């Protein structure tokens, strides 16, 4: 940034000097826009101490600018996009190019549901209290940057253990009335996509929008995917201090689910499928309105009201890989498929007020705010579908579960960033949450009196962070913050008539803590942190007996877990000579995530799992890259390694015959990515993912999309060409 700053100052001085020389003629001249790129390439940044109305001093944060990164943007490959975020666990589930499933610090990566997911600062979790998974999936081509904030800042935006992941879209060029961008991609296994965007400014109105379409036949058999996305944004600059904006975003895709495999199937042919009639399709709309008002030079108000509206549909044969799906030999008819649907109606209104004030001659900053949520999740499951092979949500018999999950929740929060000295900052904060979730509805063959369930959410959460700037290059940071995760729909729905649910379920609670050092010197960036995450009241099942001695499964809290570790990012320039630049990075995490005081069911008995490794929590994760750059062309080779994990709390050492339980072997993957910025209006990207065609999988899910082995993609390539005028 120093290079860019020096160039900018020089340009301004020259421009002002030229204007002074010709001021007697009052002649004006329109200067053309010139884009200048510094020698830094692909470096991860941290958020500033104040980002909009958020206070970020004393936290570990990462900002990844996609334009500066060699990565497979067309397929939104998370191990490449987030390569410089140490410890990110990536779960490959819906095929390349669909949703990002990630987690950090030993948490569950299923649809990133341990994180506060946002798009342009707007919440996109489908239902934070019923089903916090994020089904919204914007195209990678639409993203300008990705911001990740760890959980120690959660008091300001939510209470999630995993932190906040904010995907920020590209914006309109406000120096032009009209601009156009188009990116087309083709790749292996029938991949083809197109992204087209327009934007500009006319008077006080700024507009931007895009349309996107993608098709892929998929790496595995029967894994076709079709996706579409739309986005429109209008911002009205009412005055120099007040702007009003409205946005609407939509993403939808239809994914043919190839089904789980057993370990022997995976070794024989990881591309094979066990299903050809399974489908999954979310269709999500995210509308929002925003007011940004600079009340005074020191006070700013921001108000965002948004919604997540849509459906999550699936039609499938839900069974182990060892259960085949073949036509009946007599009738030549397939069996009926299971139809499930979630209907989301989630509304959020969040207001934030930031104020800067003076204390002993130093500027401190305070933020206060409130958040209201009004969610209505209608879940319909176990419907009897057709015997066909296409995507068809038709029913031949009513749903076996027809349930509503109503949540009303309010929160107020406050945090102050105290500048105690010119180098030392202390940031205490508090968040108070009060809410109620009510489940109502019907479950076939289940006692109606056992269905209603009310869960109260009442938390007062505290936190504190601190930062000490040793000098302009080095900062020390650390913090501790309480967090909680509400009991969700999945936790309280009995899986069968032989299962009962604890009526006194408690939300998971605990804390995030971290201590780190970040340094930026000429050609070198280091960010190292220690972390500690305590997660109480984890959900699971135990075996209980009735008064008559009959065993049954009891869904309740089974114990706690704790994740501790170190995260390290080192990146820098290795060689710089004329037009050549060689840079590299390593993004590595060591973690020990284990159960505490925990018991789980194992057949007809309960077994103590204290000390066992938490599922999908690798002890060692490392992503490393080497970038060669010549003028406007660059090439990056990246190696990703993820250590062995377990699929269940019992840490089953040998894979079961159906593939549902067992270890997930460690794996390593090589990727090769290149970018050529041919002109100011033309760029080309190319990627070879999984260069050595490693055969691996990232997780054995215990529920959707089906228990078993889900192979990740083998070697594949993609080429993208973009123009911008």
Image (cartoon, rainbow, N blue to C red):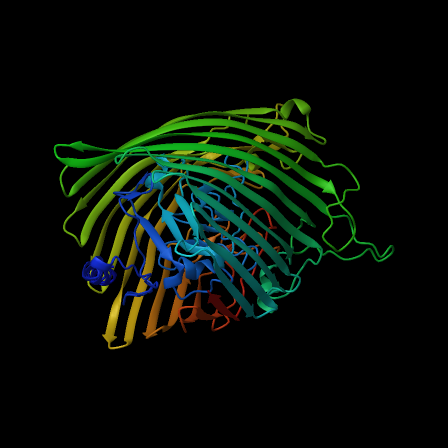
Residue placed most toward the observer, 215 or 668: 215
**Direction from residue 345 to residue 57 in the image, left or right:** left
The residue at the point 35 percent across, 73 percent down is 632
The residue at the point 45 percent across, 55 percent down is 177
**Direction from residue 86 to residue 73 in the image, left or right:** right
Vertical order, 44 against 344 (above or below): below
Residue 529: horizontal and vertical position, in percent? 27, 50
Q: From where the camera sits, is residue 161 visible?
A: yes
Residue that protrudes farthest toward the front in the picture: 25
The residue at the point 21 percent across, 35 percent down is 364
**Direction from residue 429 to residue 329 in the image, left or right:** right
Which image quarter is the N terminus in? bottom left
Residue 671: horizontal and vertical position, in percent? 44, 69
Residue placed most toward the observer, 612 or 304: 304
Vertical order, 614 against 265 (above or below): above
What is the total number of numbered labels drawn onto the structure image? Answer: 0
Query: Which of the 4 quarters of the picture holds residue 570?
Result: bottom left
Residue 101: horizontal and vertical position, in percent? 49, 51
Q: From where the camera sits, is residue 643 visible?
A: no
Vertical order, 687 against 447 (above or below): below
**Direction from residue 361 to residue 427 in the image, left or right:** right
Residue placed most toward the observer, 544 or 625: 625
Residue 2: horizontal and vertical position, in percent? 21, 60
């Amino acid at each position: 940034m120093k290079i860019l700053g020096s160039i900018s100052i020089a340009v301004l001085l020259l421009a002002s000097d030229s204007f002074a020389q010709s001021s007697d003629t009052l002649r004006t001249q329109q200067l053309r826009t010139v884009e200048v790129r510094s020698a830094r390439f692909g470096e991860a940044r941290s958020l500033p101490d104040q980002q909009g109305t958020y206070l970020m001093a004393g936290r570990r944060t990462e900002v990844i600018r996609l334009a500066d990164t060699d990565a497979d943007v067309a397929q939104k490959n998370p191990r490449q996009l987030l390569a410089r975020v140490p410890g990110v666990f990536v779960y490959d589930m819906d095929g390349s190019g669909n949703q990002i499933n990630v987690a950090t610090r030993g948490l569950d990566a299923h649809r990133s549901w341990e994180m506060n997911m946002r798009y342009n600062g707007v919440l996109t979790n489908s239902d934070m209290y019923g089903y916090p998974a994020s089904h919204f999936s914007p195209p990678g081509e639409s993203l300008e940057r990705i911001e990740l904030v760890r959980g120690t800042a959660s008091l300001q935006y939510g209470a999630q253990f995993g932190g906040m992941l904010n995907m920020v879209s590209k914006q309109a060029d406000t120096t032009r009335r009209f601009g156009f961008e188009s990116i087309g991609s083709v790749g292996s296994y029938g991949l083809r996509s197109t992204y087209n965007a327009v934007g500009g400014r006319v008077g006080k109105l700024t507009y931007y929008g895009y349309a996107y379409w993608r098709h892929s036949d998929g790496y595995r058999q029967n894994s076709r995917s079709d996706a579409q996305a739309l986005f429109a944004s209008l911002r009205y600059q009412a005055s120099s201090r007040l702007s009003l904006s409205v946005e609407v975003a939509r993403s939808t895709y239809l994914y043919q689910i190839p089904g789980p495999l057993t370990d022997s199937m995976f070794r024989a042919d990881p591309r094979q499928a066990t299903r050809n009639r399974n489908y999954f399709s979310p269709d999500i709309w995210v509308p929002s309105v925003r007011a940004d008002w600079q009340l005074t030079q020191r006070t700013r108000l921001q108000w965002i009201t948004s919604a997540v509206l849509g459906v999550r549909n699936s039609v499938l044969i839900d069974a182990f890989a060892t259960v085949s799906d073949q036509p009946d030999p007599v009738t030549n008819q397939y069996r009926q498929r299971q139809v499930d649907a979630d209907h989301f109606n989630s509304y959020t209104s969040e207001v934030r007020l930031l104020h800067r004030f003076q204390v002993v001659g130093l500027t401190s900053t305070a933020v206060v705010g409130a958040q209201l949520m009004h969610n209505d999740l209608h879940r319909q499951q176990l419907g009897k579908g057709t015997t066909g092979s296409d995507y068809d949500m038709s029913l031949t018999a009513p749903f076996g579960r027809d349930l509503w999950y109503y949540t009303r929740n309010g929160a107020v929060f406050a945090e102050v960033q105290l500048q105690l000295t010119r180098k030392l900052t202390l940031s205490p904060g508090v968040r108070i949450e009060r809410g109620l979730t009510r489940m109502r509805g019907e479950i076939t063959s289940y006692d109606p009196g056992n269905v209603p369930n009310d869960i109260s959410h009442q938390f007062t959460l505290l936190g504190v962070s601190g930062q000490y700037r040793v000098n302009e290059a080095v900062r020390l940071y650390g913090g501790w913050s309480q967090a909680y995760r509400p009991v969700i729909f999945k936790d309280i729905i009995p899986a069968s008539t032989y299962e009962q649910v604890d009526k006194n379920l408690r939300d998971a609670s605990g804390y995030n803590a971290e201590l780190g050092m970040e340094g930026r010197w000429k050609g070198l960036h280091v960010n190292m942190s220690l972390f500690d995450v305590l997660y109480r009241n984890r959900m699971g099942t135990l075996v209980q007996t009735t008064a008559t001695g009959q065993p049954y499964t009891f869904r309740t809290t089974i114990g706690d877990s704790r994740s501790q570790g170190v995260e390290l990012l080192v990146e820098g320039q290795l060689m710089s000579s004329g037009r050549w630049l060689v840079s590299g990075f390593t993004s590595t995490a060591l973690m020990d995530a284990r159960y505490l005081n925990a018991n789980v069911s194992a057949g007809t008995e309960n077994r103590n799992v204290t000390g066992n490794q938490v599922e999908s929590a690798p002890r060692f994760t490392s992503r490393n890259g080497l970038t060669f750059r010549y003028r406007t062309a660059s090439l990056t080779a990246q190696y990703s390694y993820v250590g062995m994990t377990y699929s269940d709390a019992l840490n089953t050492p040998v894979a079961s015959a159906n593939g549902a339980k067992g270890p997930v072997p460690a794996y390593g993957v090589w990727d090769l990515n290149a970018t050529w910025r041919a002109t100011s209006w033309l760029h080309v990207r190319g990627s070879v993912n999984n260069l050595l065609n490693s055969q691996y999988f990232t997780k054995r899910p215990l529920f959707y999309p089906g228990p078993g082995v889900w192979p990740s993609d083998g070697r594949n390539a993609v080429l993208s060409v973009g123009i911008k005028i």
